[in-house]
Image (tube, grey):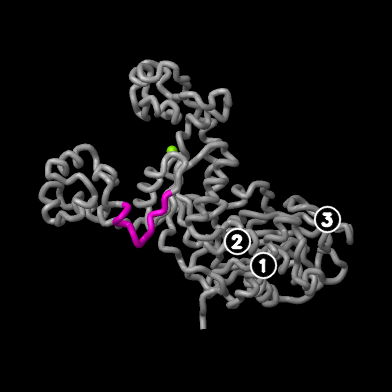
Amino acid sequence: MPSARQGEAARPPEPILHVDLDAFYANVEVQKDPSLAGKPVIVGGTGNRGVVASASYEARALGVTSAMPAVRARRLAPQAVFLPSDFEAYRAYSTRFREILLSYTPLVEPLALDEAFLDVGGATRLFGRPRRVAERIRADVLAELGFSCSVGVAPNKFLAKLASARAKPDGLIVVPSTDVRGFLDPLPVGALWGAGEKTVEILHRLGIRTVAELSAVPASVLARVLGEAQSQHLSALSRGEDHRDVVSYEAPKSISHEETFDRDLDDDGEILREILDLSRRVGARLREDGYEARTVVLKVRLANFTTLTRSRTLPSPTDLGSDLYHVASELYRALPGARRRIRLLGVQAAGLQGSGSHQMALLASGKWGDVERAMDRAERRFGRGAALPATLLGTGGRHGPGPARGNTSRDDMQDRDRGTRRTSSEGPSKTTPADPAPNARKALKSQGQDPS
Ligand SMILES: [Mg+2]
C-alpha cells in the first residue's frame, strides 16, 4: 500500500557536498575595503612572530601560504597588505554563509567558519541534482558574500572534501560514484585524510606514492608498518570508503504557527478553517526549511485561559499542510465538551527530520504535494494568501487574494473585513506542551527554529 511519493526522486548516488569559501579571511577584508581588490592581501602575521592566517590568491601567486611564518611571507611579498584578523567580521560572513547552506538542506555540518558538509540527498525534489545544488550555492555565495567558493560533490564526506580541495579556487568537481577510482588513483597518498607527514614518509620508503599504489597493498602488509588501526583506516580511504553521516548541529525541535484571536471563536467551521490555515503555513515552513514532521500537536486555548494540547504521531513523516490538517482536525474533533469558546489556536509539527527519500506521504497525496508546492511558489512571488484552497476562501472572504492582503510579512495581520485583530505567532514552540506564553515572532528564518 505505501508507495513512494509521486515525483520524489531516489536518493542520488553523490549526495554529499563539501563547500569551502576561497581565501576566506582575505576575501572578507577585500569586501570591507574594496580598494584591496586585486592586491596581495595577507591576514595575520602583522607582528614578526606571527603566522599567515589567510592569503589572497594574489599573495599565493607570490608563494605565500597559510601557516607560513610572517617573516617569510614578508620576504616573499614585501608589497603585500598585511592585516590583523577581524573575527567579528568573519563570524558575520560565516553566519550568512551558513544561512545560504541551510536554505538548501537542514543537514549542514559546519567544519569551520568557512566550510561545511551538506547532505542534499533529500533536497533534489526542490532544487535538483546535487551538481545543480552546488552550482546554485556557488552563485548564491558569490551574489551574497561577494566572493567565490569551491565545492566538491561526491558519494561521501571524505571524497567531497578531497574534491573541493582539488576544485580550488572558484571551482566545482563532481566525483561520480561510478568512477571513484578514476578520481582517487592518481592522487598522492598525502591527500588521504589522516596521512600525516610521518605516514607519508613511511609509505614513500615502501615505494607507495599514489592512492592507486596504496590500494594495491594488502592490508596485512600495511598493518606491519603502520599498525592495525591506521592501515585499516587508510585502506578504506584508498578504496574511497567513508561511512560517516553528515551531522547537523542546529536542527530545530519543532515548527509551529499560532493565532490569538481577540474575538473568541465558537463556530466549528470557522475553527477548522483556522486550523487548516495554520496547518498550511506550518507545511510551507517545513518544505521551505527542508523538514518532515513525525508528530502533529494541536494547541487550543479556551476563553477561560485553559490550554489544551493534543498530539499524535504519524505513521510516516510529512511536510504537507493537508496531512497536518487531517490529523489536527481529528485532534480537535476529539476534544471533550461542545460549544467551546477559543481564544488561541496553534498547530505544531514536531519530531522533525530532514526531508529524505524514504518517507511516504500520510495520505499518499502526491497530488496535494504538487498543489502545495505550487502555492509556495505563488506565495513567494505574490505574497501570503495569493493562492488558497477553496475551503479557506470560505464566507466573508477574509483571506481574499490580492494586494490588499499585503505581503509575506509575518507581522500581525489586520483583518480588514471584520476588524478583528489577530496576533500571529510562529516558530519555535518549545516542545513543552503547556507553554502559556505565545511565542515571540521571529523575523528571521534562522531564528524561527528551536536550536537543540
Ligand atoms: Mg576556505
What residue is at 36 percent from the left and 24 percent from the top?
Answer: 51
Kindly identify which numbered label has been placed on residue 403: 3
10 Å crowding of disc 3: few (<14), some (14-19), many (20+): few
Say whether disc 3 or disc 1 marks the residue closer to the N-terminus. Answer: 1
Location of residue 345 in the rendering, given as x and y in whole percent from the top left corner = 72, 63
What residue is at 69 percent from the left and 54 percent from the top?
Answer: 438
Indicate yes or no: mark 3 CB to ligand 1 under 8 Å: no
The residue carrying mark 2 is 287
Disc nearest the viewer among 2 and 3: 3
Q: How many marks?
A: 3
Q: Nearer the viewer, residue 52 or 151?
A: 151
Location of residue 168 in the rendering, given as x and y in whole percent from the top left corner = 42, 40
Confirm whether the magenta stretch covers residue 165. Answer: no
Location of residue 401 in the rendering, given as x and y in whole percent from the top left corner = 81, 62
What residue is at 54 percent from the left and 54 percent from the top?
Answer: 104
Please, what secondary structure does the residue beneath circle 3 have? Answer: helix
Instruction: Please report contact status of discs 2 and 1: CB closer than 8 Å, yes or no.
Output: yes
Q: Nearer the viewer, residue 403 or 63?
A: 63
Kindly identify which numbered label has been placed on residue 372: 1
Please, what secondary structure does the residue beneath circle 1 have? Answer: helix
Residue 98 against residue 289 in the figure, above or below: above
Residue 308 shows in the view: no
- The amino acid type found where label 1 is placed reads Glu
Q: Nearer the viewer, residue 388 or 419?
A: 388
